[in-house]
Image (spheres, helix red, strand yellow):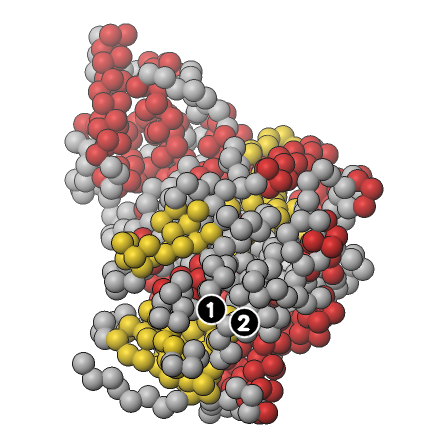
Amino acid sequence: MGKTCNINRRGALQVLAGTVVGTANFPGSLTGATGQRHPKFFHRDEFEMLDVLSEIIIPADDHSPGAHAAQVAEFMDELISQAPEKTRQLWRQGLARIEGMANAQYRRRFMACSADEQTALMRLISQNEESPQQLEEKFFVGIKRATIDGYYRSAIGIHTDLQYQGNKYIRAFPECNVSK
Amino acid sequence: MTIPKQPIFDVCVIGSGPAGGVLSKELAEAGAKVVLVEAGRKMTAKDFVYHTWPYEMPLRGLNEEGNQPAAAFPPDLIKAVQYENSDQVGLGRVRAVGGRSIHWTGVCLRFAEDDFRERSVQGVEDDWPISYNDLAPYYSYVERMIGVTGSRENLPIVPDGEYLPPLKFRCSEKILKRACGKMNIPMIPARKALLTVPHDNRPACHYCGHCDTGCDVGAIFSVPVSMLPKAEKTGNFTLMENKLAREILIDAEGQVRAVSVIDTVTRREEEIRARIFAVSCGNAETARLLLNSKSHRFPNGVANSNDIVGRYLTGHITHGVRGYLEDLVGTAPINNDGAEDHSYIPRFKLGARKPEYAGGFQIQVQHTWFMLPYHAHAVKGFGESFKKQVRELQPGYCFMGCFGKVLAKYENRITVDSSQKDSFGIPIPVVRFRFSDNDLALWRDMTETSAEILDGAKVRLMVQGNSRPGGFASHDVGTVRMGRDPKMSVLNSFCQTHEVKNLFVVDGSCFTTSPEKNPTLTIMALAVRTARYMADAIRKGDL
């Protein structure tokens, strides 16, 4: 389906979910072994920041692991490596801006900040989520969107967190028996 | 270049979607020698992503959620269209043996008596040259042939058909039905070409919830699984894949003598000859082929002396809304997948409560995946509370997909532009389309009313779809309309062109008007009716 001017029912969904990136097939899988592989687009220190930021957005809790375990940073690296140049630069500049904010606020690199300080920075950039104006606010919207897409499409997101029960062969569809 | 010698077929059908597939099978069974010419190729299991988990796909399936087999949408096709001064609409085009039937939700609705009589009943558009009663036996024939799940409801707006047992409602659908009941809006089991019991040597649905990814067992009707084997069995049938029709060629008497096709693999051009030709390429591609078939006799394209081909482009105006039902939020996750939409809200606001605008809208309920938390993008904030909210909302998911009537207008049209060609050198279709005031009034009402229904069902969160109307939901039709008046239409009621006796157009492009209902069942019923007419004419020597 073409991505422009082609709002069919699927297209409408994709727009709503904000997931229209392109129509091409992408070679290579992201779900293989990780760790030793170099990021495709981000520098190693940027990649580590993404890992921490995504975990702040969707953290591990007593119910399920979070974005770090679901390798969301690797998903984002793949996603942005395929994005238009303008988007790629926005991400890079966004990370630099957060680095600058950490420096101004705490006189430390972001990665050297405490968990509370990192979360406080995240709160700062998330305040204008509905109509982001500043670069860091737009970056928050972008990284949150990508974290959601990466996490809830991972095995952890689908099976452990949401406990999705479907995509299997069943003989008969069970009638609803909720009496409420 | 040498032209390979082809036998002369009785009928050459161009395009193998629901129209061309049914037409070919019916004609072959009636004894006609049929060649079915398709621009795409046969899809194999490898082309589909049946049952695949997002994390097994590149980029976690982010770009796969249309789930169409990529091979059926080659870049040649995707790029070969131009929208000029148009609202946010898209033509539904696909290039594969089976056409759109290889992945669809299977909705099969009979048009109502009044849907054929818009001019007489509402004073808009034109009446069809046929009535519901003309088509009713063919609706029945198709329903029995393909297997349609549904229930008899005695609602004139959606005439009952011949049904396999209905789908069971999900909890969300039971809650929604109660809310509809309070507003006096009927909500009924979905009517779809999906088997709830085995039928015609095909197994019943296994409720994996991925219908329009393509059904791996053939529980949803498709041309390759259900029609082509029957056609092949007759010994009267030839399938030609990867043959893109360039032009319909006219002889000295003004009849079609051949269709010129390009082999998309070898890029070689050849002519396919037959006594009768049926164009079934799907609305836009059908109009394109006719318009590109210019000759001394038909300088505006074949069968187009009146400049009607390509005009009256219509389809559906759409809206989607998601609600997260209070009663289900926070409940334990269960398997909701089923067969996509199990229920359906037919057009309401009839009779005394009739709205200001002409036409109406229908709502398909729950025809999307249950796997992904679409609402996560609408939940504010981040961190543990964000994650918990997303998780708790998910079991309450309820989607309403609204489809509204679009008035067929003379000025909304497809043309071809000889300065813009596809990679095979064929001029591409150019679309000019604007929604009318009537369409927009209907859209606003559809948007408000669907939210009202969800409100009545009590939701924790509601996420509206686009703030602008879109079309056509792969339901574009109307560009080669049938009609009584040869000045204002291209086809007679048997899908035969007024101007060229041995040229037929059998697909959604033949619709005089489009109601709010999905077009495919009517397309297939018209294909059977036309097949009978053709077979009769061949027998009598009229064609």
Residue at 25% from the left image edge and 17% from the top image edge = A97
At which x and y percent is residue B441? 63, 36
Residue B250 in the figure: left or right of residue B409: left
Q: Nearer the viewer, residue A81 or B492?
A: B492
Q: Nearer the viewer, residue B162 or A117?
A: B162
**Mark 2 and mark 1 on one chain:** yes
**Residue B303 — which label?**
1
Bin the neighbour count of mark 1 within 10 Å (Cα to Cα): few under 14, some 14-19, many 20 and up: many
CA gap, disc 2 and disc 1? 7 Å
User: In the figure, A17 relative to B198: above or below?
Assistant: above
User: Label 2 marks which chain's residue?
Assistant: B
- Mark 2 or mark 1: whose residue is earlier in sequence: 1
Quarter holding the N terminus of chain B?
bottom left
User: Label 1 marks which chain's residue?
Assistant: B
In the picture of the structure, the residue carrying the numbered disc 2 is: B498
At which x and y percent is residue B421? 28, 57
Bin the neighbour count of mark 2 within 10 Å (Cα to Cα): few under 14, some 14-19, many 20 and up: many
Please, what is the three-letter code of the amino acid marked with disc 2? Answer: His
Q: Quadrant of residue B398?
A: top right
Q: Nearer the viewer, residue B483 or B135?
A: B483
